[in-house]
Structure formats: structure tokens, C-alpha cells
Amino acid sequence: MKHGSLLRRLWAATVFVFTYLLIGPTASMAASLPCDLYASGGTPCVAAHSTTRALFANYNGSLYQVKRASDGQTKDIGLLAKGGYANAATQDAFCAGTTCIISVIYDQTTNLNHLTVEPKGGNGGADNGVPADALPITAGGVKVYGASFSGVMGYRNVATTRVATSGSPEAMYMVTSGTHYNGACCFDYGNAETSITDTGNGHMDAINFGSECWFSPCIGSGPWVQADLENGLFQSGAGPSQDSTYTGDTEPYVTAMLKNDGQTSFALKHGNAQSGTLATSYSGALPTGGYTPMHLEGSIVLGTGGDNSNGSIGSFFEGVMTTGVSSDSVDNAVQANIVSVGYGGPTSVSGTLSQDSTISLKATTTCCTTRSISQQSGGTAQSGTVDTAVVTSSSSLSARQDATWIVRAGLADSTCYSFESRDYPGEFMRHFNFHIYRQPMDGSLQFRQDATFCAETGKSGQGKSFASYNYPTRYLRHYNNILYVSTDGGTNDFDSATSWAADVSWLITAPLAP
Ligand code: AHR
Ligand code: AHR
Ligand code: AHR
């Protein structure tokens, strides 16, 4: 450690202690946010991005900017309070009746390393911004939006300030999702090339999250937290995982961390962003062959590979990059703070058909009163079918989560409803060929309409019935325990008039997985 930096740390500690003695634990000191924690450890954030919350207790600026399709106007989305959570209502009002993309994700540090939509690169055409309302979630007890990436979506800053270059040390983390990923290159957040082309080994130092196994054998099926150091997604210095217990992170919210001293060593950590602590899947030597020292260029990438390879999908809620390698105790404090956010937790209203309430939908036909609408993918990401299943309060947590939905404003019409999966944030019930699936919102008008259902009094007189927004004679119906949108007495077998009224009538109940 250099002399100057030791003195600076001593001075910072002294100032902290004196301030504490003088004014006591103020609200902002009590609630140290990730960048406050990194600063206290002497490894300050040089970039801090989030669409959900402030990452400094004193931050009171904008989190991101949305751009609407109707007139091309933009709007900055800020916080409900200093050091707090995003003001999603501003976005909802500005984007009402049209669609919005996230056009900028602001850097909360004074470096202003903002992320804008990534242009064409060495491998992949120009990207799109993510649909601004594709990933409604709960954080800090309020509704906020995450950033949901389909393919050909990404953000970049090629002219940053204070981000590590050459062989300088840095650390970074992001909160992402283990239920929205794929095996294509490369859902990354971190340091990349300024030219948006592959300039060789060691020119990247980014967190990668996905199921692409670059160095086999991989253990389990992922998705894994990996280091994209360029021309390789590393789980260790040798390439493949050296942690036989690490089969991937499949939780809805995942903390992914990468630390790299730029000279000889790097480390990877992962954890459930909703509970518990971080585990280290690797801590050791950097790969050989151009990675020692690193050749960092200091561009920041989000959602694609260094050369803009943009086949990957993923979710982003928050992330930071530091200067210097953070200590394990700071990493632990950052994880504890992330857990305290309560990402995806239940909202205050539950069991009612009202926006952001968590519910289950129970069949009313006499055959089937133990059955609720339930996604059926069994844990595989993307595009599960949605049917009815027997689920009770004594069923497994995963079965109860499969049968739990978050009521959202209708994606095509806010007077109607869309139903977001409890354990697949950003994925909604939608019909396709009149069958019901659970799929990620892709921002298209077709998806928005297929995922919007308008509530009426239950056709049998019990509960509610849900008319398809774009096929208004068709209602959400179970038939042979499979879910459809069905017309009373229509031409398909699942349109059968027998017990139609009961099959389209649903009880809104308390969520099976609160
Ligand atoms: O290292 C994996 C990927 O390989 C990088 O992200 C990209 O630049 C290259 O195609
Ligand atoms: O479910 C009926 C239609 O099938 C949907 O509107 C469309 O997405 C698909 O072709
Ligand atoms: O979905 C279960 C039953 O299957 C429905 O109640 C009936 O219409 C069909 O036979």
C-alpha cells in the first residue's frame, strides 16, 4: 500500500469518528448504501448504475432516462427521496398510452459515466434500448423497474472518467436474475474495449452472467457468474470451474461480483440477492496468455460482449465499478445492503385484483377447486406453459411460487391487467395460438396485447373472468386442466360450451407464496 493512500484512509477514518461523535448516527450514516460502503473501505465507486435505487445515501439525482415512441421526447426518472428508490410513477405517467425505452442509465458518481444505447460493434449491429416497463419489480417496498434485455439490446460508454485502465485494480458487482438468461454471448457488465471490437486477451474485465460454457467441463447447467476477460468466459484462471459445488445461480435475484488486481489475480463471488451471504467460486491467479497484466481500456459495457456480441438476454437491477480491489468485509456489507432492499418481495396489498398485489388464481369448477393457475416449466428459464395445478399451502415453495402472480397494469391497456410470474421477474402470462405461456415481455405490441386481460364479474357469478384484450370474446379458461383463451361454444375443443362459465370464473386468493 502506498504511503499517501494510508494517510488518506487514516484521515477519512478520523473525520468519520469525529463527525459521528459530534452529530451521532444520522439517517444517511445509518443507511450506508453500496458506494458509501466501498468508499469507507478505500475502494470508491467510479461508476454506479441502477434503475431501482440510489447507491449513495446522499444521491438525489436521476437514475435513468426514458424515451417515448409517440413523440420522441425524453424524461429523467429520479428518486422518491434522497438515497431512496426510483419514482416509477413518473415513468408510468410519461409513458401512458405509448411505449418507452430506457435511453440512458445515469452514473450516480461525480464521474458521470453514463450508459447510452450501444452502437454497432465488431460483432453485432446497433443495439436497442430495453423496453422501460418490461421488468416491474418491488424494491424497498415500492414498485420500480429493472432493465430486461432481450437479444440485440445493450448499453455502452466508450469515454469514461476514472474507470480502471491498463493493469489497474478494480472490483464490480451487479444484481441480475437467475431466471432470465441464455447461453449466447454475452450478458456482461464491466470494463471493455473503447473501440467496441475485440482487441485481444486481457482487454476486458467484466462480470458475465449466463449459461454459455466457454471452458468445459462446466458443472451443472448454470447460469454462472463468470469473468469475461476477453476471448473467454473464465470461472477460474485455468478456465473451467474449480468449485465442484457451483452449479449456477437460479434464484430470481442474484448478486454477481468480480474483483481483479490487474496484475496477477482475480476473484468471483455469487449469492442470492434476496437472502444470505456471498460464496467465492474462485480466488486465484489470472489466466496466462496475455492476461498478466491486464490491458484494460476503461469502456463500460452492459448487456453485450466487448465486441458487441449481442445474442444474450438478461436482467439488470443495479451495479457498480470501483477503483481498487474491495475487501471481503466490504463485499459482505454490500451483499447485506442488497438483501435489505427486499428485491421482489411481497407488496403491502396482497390477494386483491389491484396493481402490484400478489395473488393466486383458483379454479371454481367443481372438478378443480384445489387447482390454481400455475406456470409449468419446472425451473427452466423462458417460455414455460401455464396451466392449472393442484397447489395447496403445504405444497413445496417452488410449487407455490409457480402458482403466484403479481398483478400489473395491463401492458396494452392500463384499465386491464397483466400477470407477472412471481419467480420469473419480467415474464408474463400471454396467449399464443390461444394457449397460455409464461414469457419475457419483449416490448412488441403483439406481446403487450397477448398479455393483457380485462376483468369482468365471473361468468358463473363467482369470482372474476378475464377477457383477452385482443380477442375480446375469448376468456382465460381451463380445459382438461390446460389453460387457453376460449370462446363459449367456439370451434376448438377447448371452446366447448360444457362448463364454460365455471371454467372461465376464477377466485382471486391470497398468494400461495407470499
Ligand atoms: O470473451 C467473450 C467474448 O468474446 C467477448 O465479450 C467478446 O468481445 C468476444 O467475442
Ligand atoms: O393466441 C392467439 C394468437 O396467436 C396471438 O395473438 C398471437 O401472438 C399468436 O399468433
Ligand atoms: O379443466 C378441467 C375440466 O376439463 C374442465 O372443467 C372441463 O371443461 C374440461 O373437461
Image (spheres, rainbow, N blue to C red):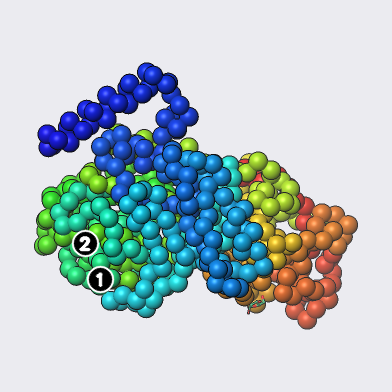
Q: Which secondary structure, mark 1?
A: loop
Q: Are marks 1 and 2 in contact (CB under 8 Å)?
A: yes
Q: Where the C terminus falls, by quadrant?
A: top right
Numbered tag placed on residue 22 in the rendering: none
Q: Which secondary structure, mark 2?
A: loop
Residue 178, picture quadrant: bottom left
**Image position of 18 with respect to 462: above or below:** above
Numbered tag placed on residue 195 in the rendering: 1
Q: How many marks?
A: 2
**Image position of 514 with respect to 483: above or below:** above
Foreground pick, 141 / 194: 194
Q: Residues within 10 Å of mark 2 (few under 14, many from 20)?
A: many
Furthest residue toward bottom: 491
Left or right of residue 502: residue 54? left
Closer to the chain start, of discs 1 and 2, is 1
Mark 2 highlights which residue? 297
